[in-house]
Image (spheres, rainbow, N blue to C red):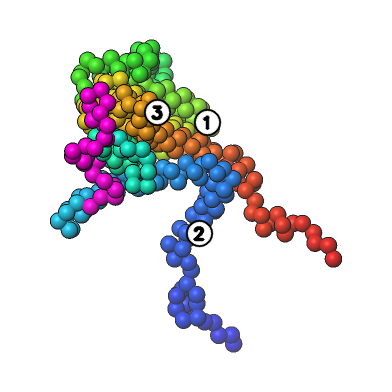
Amino acid sequence: MAVTEEPRAPGSAGVPSGPTRPRKTLRSLRPGLRGFVRVMRANPLTLLGFAMVVVIFVLALLITILPMVGQALLGRPLSILPYDPAYYPSPCPGPIVNNVTVCSLPPSAQHFLGTDNLGRDMFSRVLAALPLDLAIGFSITLFALLVGGSLGLVAGYWDRPGTIGGVFSVMILRLADVFLAFPSLVLALAIAATLGRDLGPSLLAILFTWWPYYVRLVRGEVLVVKQQPYIVAAKAAGVSDVRIVLRHVIRNITEPVLVYFTLDVGTVIVTFSTISFIGVGVKLGVLEWGNMVEGYQTYLTSYPWMVLSAGAAIFLTVLAFGLLGDGLRDVLDPRSRKALAQTAVPTTLAAAAVPVEA
C-alpha cells in the first residue's frame, strides 16, 4: 500500500521557497538595464550628455540645499563655492580704465575663470547662477508641456467634425496658430518689455509664447496613435475615451514628447539668456548668465574671460541637454535601441569567436 505525503508549504523544511517579489522585480529590470548600458556604450556622446546633466543637477542641488542644511545643523551656512560671489577686495589694486578701477585678474590656479572688474571670482559667480537658470529652463518647459500637451490631447483625440470636441479642437488650433504666426523670441521680447524688467514678467513672456509648440507636437502624435488597431479595439469593447487616453494614448506618445522636452530645456535657457542680454530680463545685479554677459560685454576685448565664462556655462548646459535628448531618441526608439545594442558587442565575445590555430 503506497503512502502519500501531504504537500508541504513553500518555505518549510525541505521545500525551497520561490523568489521573493524584490528579486522578481530585479530580474525583470535586468534586461532593460543591460540594453541601456549597451546603448550607452555604443553611443559615447549620449553617455557624455547623461553624465553632464547629472553633474549639472547635482551642483544645482548642492548650491541650493547645502547652505540651508548647514544653517540648520551647524548654525552657519555651508557652500561648495570657492569664494563668496558678492565679495570683492577693497581697496581694489587694479589699473584705472576710463576713470574706473578694474580689478580683473586672468584665469589662474587661485581663480579658475579669473575675476571680474570688481575682483569677484567668476567661477563662483557662474556656479551661483546655475540653480536659477536651470529652474527657469525646467519650469517654463514643464508649464508649456502641461498646458500645450493637454490642449494637444483634446485637439487630437476629440477632433471629430460636428461635435463639441471638434469645435474645441478648431478653437485650440486657431489660437495656437495666432501665437505661432509671430517669432517666439520677438513676441517674448515685446511682452517682457511691456510688463517691465524683472524675473516674473520675463517668465510670463516666454510662457505665453512656448505652449503652442507642444500643442502641435502632441496633436500630431495623438492623430497617429488613435488610428492604431488597439485603440479601435478598445473603442469597440466599450472602453471610455478618457480611459483610452489615460491608459493607451499618453503611454504611447511619451517617448517623442520626452525627447522634445529634454531638447527644449536648453532652448528655453538660451531664449531667457537672450532676453536678459538685451536688457528686458532680470534686473541688474541678479546672478543669471544672460544678465552677466550683458553686464560684462564692455570688457570683451580687454578682459574676455569675464564674458566667456558665462557664455561657456550657457554653451555647456545647452550641449548637455542636446546630447541627452539625441541619445534618448535612440534609447527610447525600439528599432534604434536594437541596432545600437547589436553594435555594442563585448570585445571578449568577439575574441572568443576567432578560431585559435593549433
Residue sitting nearer the eye, 60 or 1: 60
Above or below: residue 81 compared with residue 283: below
Q: Nearer the viewer, mark 1 or mark 3?
A: 3
Quadrant where the image shows the C terminus = bottom right
Task: Check disc 3 and report the residue beneath it.
Answer: 267
Residue at the spot 48% in from the left edge and 66% down from the top edge = 19
The amino acid sitting under disc 1 is Gln
Q: Can residue 164 be seen in this view?
A: no
Q: How many marks?
A: 3
Question: Gap in Å between the C-alphas at discs 3 and 2?
Answer: 38 Å
Residue 295 horizontal side relative to residue 48, left or right: left
The residues colored magenta run 78-103
Instruction: Report if the CB atoms under discs 3 and 2 are less than 8 Å apart.
Output: no
The amino acid sitting under disc 2 is Arg
Instruction: Report if the CB atoms under discs 2 and 1 are less than 8 Å apart.
Output: no
Residue at the spot 47% in from the left edge and 59% down from the top edge = 26
The amino acid sitting under disc 3 is Thr
